[in-house]
Image (cartoon, rainbow, N blue to C red):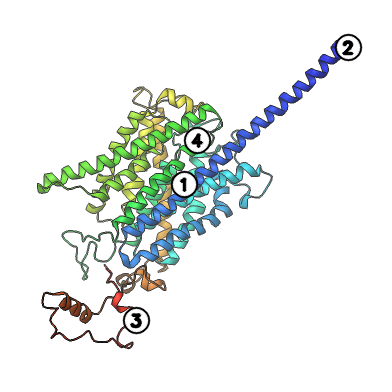
């Protein structure tokens, strides 16, 4: 064999090895990206536990089982609705070279000639997002909405309303999307993880729902229907559950935001995801402190007494998380702190405005998600850094308004996006809730609301609400008093089975507030 033949043989083998190695590296990168999406989706789905605990703690104890079941049904009904048509409406037929469309269509039920591996991972990730939208609405209309109505609007929101918004923002054929080959004004909207599509959509749907269904009985009017001078307070039955839910949501947000980068197989993508995690942390912390200290200062100004409100602090934190969700990949960390501080004030103002307008929101989901989400999209228009924009969105060229006061392009697109989300969601959901109300499918009756939804619609309440018999309590107090050691006191009478349950002595009275 000649030297040339040997060289060609070796060269061909080396080229073959090189090709195989490149293919294996690419395959490993794809696998890493799929795992990143699945793991991020699992963290986002863990937020359902956060929503459940937050809502369960926020409602009165007589409605606790009901709100927990609602949160479970968000996942069950949402999964089926998103599988049937929701995902298809959002991302079906994506083609960056195709025309802009209002809604997508293609591969319903995850069928068709597709790359199943990436579609399965992406579907799971997006399903977790969709479930979060309906859970936002659950807390606002809690304690007075019929079970059938909740099932209807939850499926409708996940299967149709939300997919239209997510299509506009993130599909390659969406009219606002920055991922299109021909984005709006050559730029497209900057919203990495859903301040607009997820949080604002859920908050606006919640606003439409509570306007149609009306406030809880006794919140703003007395039993005769006369307006109260001061709204009645319906305090949460478990602040501990609220706290647990808040931290579970914050933890899940580390899937919500960083995993929205979608890939982590390159150093550049990993750097973007890392920045997102840092900005998410700083905005949440700054918003919590902003809400707490501002509310404390306002209370001190009104009453002369300094107090620290845990609920205000928790909701401020969640508002900061909702706000940073849009700009988290494109703003400097110190701007994330500013975004968080303003988010805390946005929450306080939104919560105050609801009371003034006599709009009943059981968990303050409207100021947290609608106002926080709106501020997040606007913050991206103000503070987006040109350097970070180039790293996270290579095809975008217009930075935030604060970096170039003469270039309003990005801020204008962000304003259009929030107007679209509000207009589309409010009109469609208000009409949907109105139809349910017209057919008497929306609100429970007065007696059921007074008794509580747990006893009205479920076999068992969340808590044992049978009180200890008063005579047993009196006898126990007497025995433990300073005179109770007297031998002249009669012995504790035996309790007949017909008089009390066998475990009556160990029953603990529970609040039915």
The 10 Å Cα crowd at callout 3, few under 14, some 14 to 19, many 20 or more, is few
| Mark identifier at residue 502 | 3
Asked whether the viewer can see residue 327, the reply is no
Vertical arrangement, residue 69 with respect to residue 167, above or below: below
Q: Give how far apart the Cα atoms at labels 2 and 1 are.
A: 63 Å
Q: For the residue labelled by badge 2, is the local secondary structure a helix, a strand or a loop?
A: loop
Q: Which residue in the structure is indicated by mark 1? A: 44
The 10 Å Cα crowd at callout 4, few under 14, some 14 to 19, many 20 or more, is many
Mark nearer the N terminus (3 vs 1): 1
Q: Is the C-beta separation of discs 2 and 3 under 8 Å? A: no
* Residue 421 figure quarter: top left
Q: Give how far apart the Cα atoms at labels 4 and 3 are.
A: 59 Å
Q: Nearer the viewer, residue 382 or 423?
A: 382
Q: Nearer the viewer, residue 423 or 36?
A: 36
The 10 Å Cα crowd at callout 1, few under 14, some 14 to 19, many 20 or more, is many
Q: For the residue labelled by badge 3, is the local secondary structure a helix, a strand or a loop?
A: loop
Q: Is the C-beta separation of discs 2 and 1 under 8 Å? A: no
Q: Give how far apart the Cα atoms at labels 2 and 4 are.
A: 53 Å
Q: Which residue in the structure is indicated by mark 2? A: 2
Q: Nearer the viewer, residue 335 or 213?
A: 335
Label 2 vs label 1, nearer the camera: 2
Label 4 vs label 3, nearer the camera: 3
Q: Is the C-beta separation of discs 3 and 1 under 8 Å? A: no
Q: Give how far apart the Cα atoms at labels 2 and 3 are.
A: 100 Å
Residue 275 lies left or right of residue 508; in this view the side is right
| Mark identifier at residue 261 | 4
* Residue 62 figure quarter: bottom left
Q: For the residue labelled by badge 1, is the local secondary structure a helix, a strand or a loop?
A: helix
């Amino acid at each position: 064999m000649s030297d040339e033949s040997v060289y060609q043989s070796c060269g061909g083998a080396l080229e073959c090895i090189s090709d195989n190695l490149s293919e294996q590296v690419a395959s490993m990168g794809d696998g890493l990206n799929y795992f990143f999406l699945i793991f991020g989706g699992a963290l986002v789905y863990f937020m359902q536990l956060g929503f459940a605990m937050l809502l369960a703690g926020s409602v009165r104890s007589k409605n606790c089982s009901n709100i927990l079941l609602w949160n479970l049904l968000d996942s069950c009904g949402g999964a089926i609705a998103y599988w049937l048509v929701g995902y298809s409406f959002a991302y079906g037929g994506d083609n960056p070279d195709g025309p802009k469309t209002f809604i997508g269509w293609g591969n319903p039920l995850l069928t068709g000639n597709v790359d199943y591996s990436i579609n399965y991972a992406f579907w799971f990730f997006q399903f977790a997002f969709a479930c979060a939208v309906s859970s936002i609405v659950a807390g606002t209309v809690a304690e007075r909405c019929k079970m059938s109505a909740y099932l209807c609007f939850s499926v409708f929101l996940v299967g149709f309303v939300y997919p239209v918004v997510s299509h506009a923002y993130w599909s390659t054929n969406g009219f606002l999307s920055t991922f299109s080959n021909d984005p709006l004004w050559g730029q497209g909207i900057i919203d990495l993880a859903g301040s607009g599509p997820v949080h604002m959509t859920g908050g606006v749907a919640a606003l439409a729902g509570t306007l149609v269904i009306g406030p809880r009985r006794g919140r703003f009017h007395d039993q005769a229907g006369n307006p109260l001078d001061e709204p009645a307070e319906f305090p949460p039955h478990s602040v501990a559950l609220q706290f647990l839910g808040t931290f579970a949501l914050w933890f899940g947000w580390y899937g919500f935001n960083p995993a929205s980068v979608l890939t982590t197989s390159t150093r550049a993508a990993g750097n973007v995801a890392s920045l997102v995690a840092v900005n998410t942390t700083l905005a949440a912390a700054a918003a919590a402190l902003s809400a707490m200290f501002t509310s404390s200062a306002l209370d001190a100004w009104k009453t002369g007494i300094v107090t620290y409100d845990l609920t205000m602090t928790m909701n401020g934190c969640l508002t900061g998380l909702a706000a940073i969700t849009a700009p988290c990949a494109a703003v400097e960390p110190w701007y994330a702190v500013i975004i968080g501080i303003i988010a805390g004030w946005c929450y306080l103002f939104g919560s105050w405005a609801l009371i003034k307008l006599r709009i009943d929101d059981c968990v303050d989901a409207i100021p947290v998600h609608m106002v926080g989400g709106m501020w997040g999209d606007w913050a991206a228009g103000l503070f987006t850094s040109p350097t970070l924009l180039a790293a996270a969105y290579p095809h975008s060229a217009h930075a935030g308004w604060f970096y170039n006061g003469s270039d309003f392009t990005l801020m204008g697109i962000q304003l259009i996006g929030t107007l679209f989300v509000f207009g589309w969601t409010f009109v469609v959901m208000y009409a949907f809730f109105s139809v349910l109300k017209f057919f008497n499918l929306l609100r429970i009756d007065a007696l059921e609301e007074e008794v509580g939804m747990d006893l009205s619609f479920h076999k068992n309440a969340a808590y044992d609400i049978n009180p200890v018999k008063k005579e047993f309590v009196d006898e126990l107090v007497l025995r433990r008093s300073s005179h109770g050691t007297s031998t002249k006191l009669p012995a504790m009478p035996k309790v007949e089975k017909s008089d009390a349950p066998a475990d009556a002595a160990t029953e603990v009275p529970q609040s039915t507030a």
